[in-house]
Image: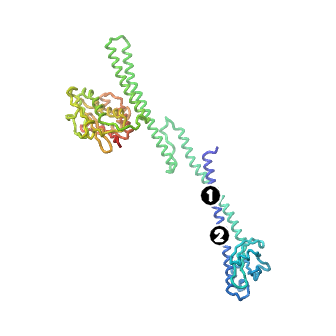
């Protein structure tokens, strides 16, 4: 089977040859028609001149008006023309000297057409050359018509010369265009071959390499730019995957190592029941960390694969926030942190607000939660919805609220608020903790990344919570912004498209 390059070259030759053949044929036919029309016009002019002279002098003898014998040059238009004047029965009344004793042939059909007043053009088999004749009727007098004949030899020679010229020019053009097409396709496919060779060398370990660029901005250049951009994205994705695998292995290895160490130490010698219970509880804590880490890794994998984000009905946000804040109360109470849940109509709520969840108070005396879901006048009320699976929305809110509680100082404040706008809903979580330096805000959503504050304070965590939250929100068409809270701590704002949009 022919290669694509050869098929393209063959197609180019066929198209060029066809176009040139059609163009040359049409030009040749036009030239033939023009030359013969020019000869017919010259014959007709001469015949009409003779006919007009005869019609104007009916009483004079019938004669052909030959060029004079004066010193003036003869009119070239009449030198190679055969002229004769015929009567009603086809008899020759007069003829030009160059006819001699010969006569142009006539038949009954021609005489009948002339009698009806028709001007007739025809080819004749007369003498040694192809001949063209015109017969013009004469009105009045003894003559029926004036006939003028001329040789087609010059016309045929010109047509033959033009045909050879078109043939030679066509062959030259076909050869030149074929060579040019072959050079062009060779250059194009040479670049493609370079791309193929380089692409074959690029693998998972050599993604940093790029395809050779021809240095032009044509289609090949744009193709290579596009492929190089794709390679850059693949390199970034592979690098992120390698980092993710390495970090995940490290994060999984640590609790497994601790769990194994504790079990080995426990089994070295017999121990009392209390020691076994303590070891089992410690192991259970490590298993819980492993379970959380594995669940987050599985959720990330499903979201990366486009799963878990099927279209869902709008979900009310307020009840989810209330549940998340309620579940975060024990951790907040243990550190004396005031956890506040406020709606859009209460933007200034703080630790002393009437709607605060007073985490530092006892459960029996704690004020009732601010019921966002039942306050019809609150902008964060029943109209605040998002098109997210309930469990994923709860995971986002839980990650942000638990992070705020973990990073706030003892006795500090965490404010959770909900703001509804015409085209979006904003979930805001802010604290009075150490905050995030500007250089860390760009990396805070990277997987397994933990900021300086987490490392210094040795705060527990997997480094996946914010990455998972960001992926969920972006998959839903929203975004998470990081800023500074009113107390100088961290402020996370989740922008979600309206659920009824």
Observer able to see residue 99? yes
Q: Is residue 8 left or right of residue 72?
A: left
Placement of the N terminus among the 4 image quadrants: top right
Q: Is residue 94 left or right of residue 295?
A: right
Measured as percent of width and height from the top left, residue 291 is found at: 38, 25
Q: Is residue 321 above or below residue 171?
A: above
Give whichever of discs 2 and 1 has the lower sequence position. 1
Q: Which residue is mark 1?
A: 19
Q: Is residue 10 above or below residue 483?
A: below
Residue 391 falls in image quadrant? top left
- Residue at point 60%, 47% (across, down): 5
How crowded is the residue under tag 2: few (<14 C-alpha within 10 Å), some, or many (20+)? few
Measured as percent of width and height from the top left, residue 500 is found at: 35, 42
Callout 2: SS:
helix
The CA distance from mark 2 to mark 1 is 22 Å
Callout 1: SS:
helix
Measured as percent of width and height from the top left, residue 138 is found at: 69, 81
Q: Which residue is mark 2?
A: 34
Residue 256 falls in image quadrant? top left
Q: Is residue 343 above or below residue 459?
A: below
Toward the bottom, the furthest residue is 59
Placement of the C terminus among the 4 image quadrants: top left
């Amino acid at each position: 089977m022919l290669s694509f390059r050869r098929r393209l070259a063959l197609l180019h030759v066929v198209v060029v040859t066809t176009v040139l053949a059609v163009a040359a044929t049409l030009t040749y036919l036009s030239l033939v028609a023009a030359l013969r029309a020019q000869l017919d016009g010259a014959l007709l002019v001469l015949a009409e001149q003779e006919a007009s002279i005869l019609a104007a002098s009916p009483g004079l003898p019938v004669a052909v008006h030959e060029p004079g014998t004066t010193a003036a040059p003869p009119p070239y238009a009449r030198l190679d023309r055969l002229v004769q004047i015929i009567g009603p029965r086809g008899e020759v009344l007069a003829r030009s000297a160059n006819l001699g004793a010969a006569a142009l042939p006539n038949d009954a059909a021609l005489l009948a057409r002339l009698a009806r007043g028709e001007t007739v053009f025809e080819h004749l088999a007369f003498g040694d050359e192809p001949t063209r004749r015109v017969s013009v009727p004469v009105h009045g007098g003894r003559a029926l018509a004036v006939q003028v004949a001329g040789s087609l030899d010059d016309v045929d020679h010109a047509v033959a010369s033009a045909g050879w010229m078109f043939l030679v020019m066509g062959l030259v053009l076909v050869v030149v265009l074929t060579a040019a097409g072959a050079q062009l396709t060779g250059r194009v496919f040479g670049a493609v071959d370079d791309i193929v060779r380089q692409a074959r060398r690029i693998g998972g370990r050599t993604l940093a390499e790029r395809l050779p660029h021809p240095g032009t901005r044509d289609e090949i250049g744009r193709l290579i730019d596009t492929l190089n951009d794709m390679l850059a994205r693949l390199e970034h994705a592979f690098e992120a995957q390698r980092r993710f695998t390495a970090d995940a292995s490290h994060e999984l290895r640590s609790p497994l190592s601790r769990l194994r160490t504790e079990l080995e130490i426990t089994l070295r010698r017999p121990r009392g029941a209390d020691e076994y219970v303590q070891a089992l509880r410690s192991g259970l804590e490590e298993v819980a960390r492993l379970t959380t880490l594995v669940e987050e890794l599985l959720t990330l994998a499903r979201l990366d694969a486009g799963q878990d984000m099927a279209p869902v009905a709008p979900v009310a946000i307020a009840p989810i926030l209330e549940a998340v804040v309620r579940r975060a109360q024990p951790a907040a109470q243990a550190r004396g942190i005031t956890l506040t849940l406020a709606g859009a109509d209460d933007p200034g709520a703080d630790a002393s607000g009437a709607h605060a969840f007073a985490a530092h108070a006892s459960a029996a005396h704690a004020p009732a939660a601010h019921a966002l879901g039942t306050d019809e006048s609150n902008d964060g009320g029943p109209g605040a919805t998002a098109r997210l699976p309930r469990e994923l929305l709860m995971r986002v809110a839980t990650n942000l609220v638990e992070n705020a509680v973990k990073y706030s100082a003892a006795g500090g404040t965490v404010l959770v608020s909900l703001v509804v706008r015409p085209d979006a809903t904003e979930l805001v979580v802010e604290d009075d903790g150490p905050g995030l330096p500007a250089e860390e805000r760009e990396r805070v959503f990277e997987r397994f990344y933990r900021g300086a504050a987490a490392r210094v304070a040795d705060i527990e965590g997997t480094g996946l919570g914010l990455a998972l939250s960001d992926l969920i929100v972006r998959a839903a068409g929203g975004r998470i912004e990081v800023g500074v809270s009113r107390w100088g701590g961290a402020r996370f704002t989740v922008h979600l498209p309206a659920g009824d949009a």
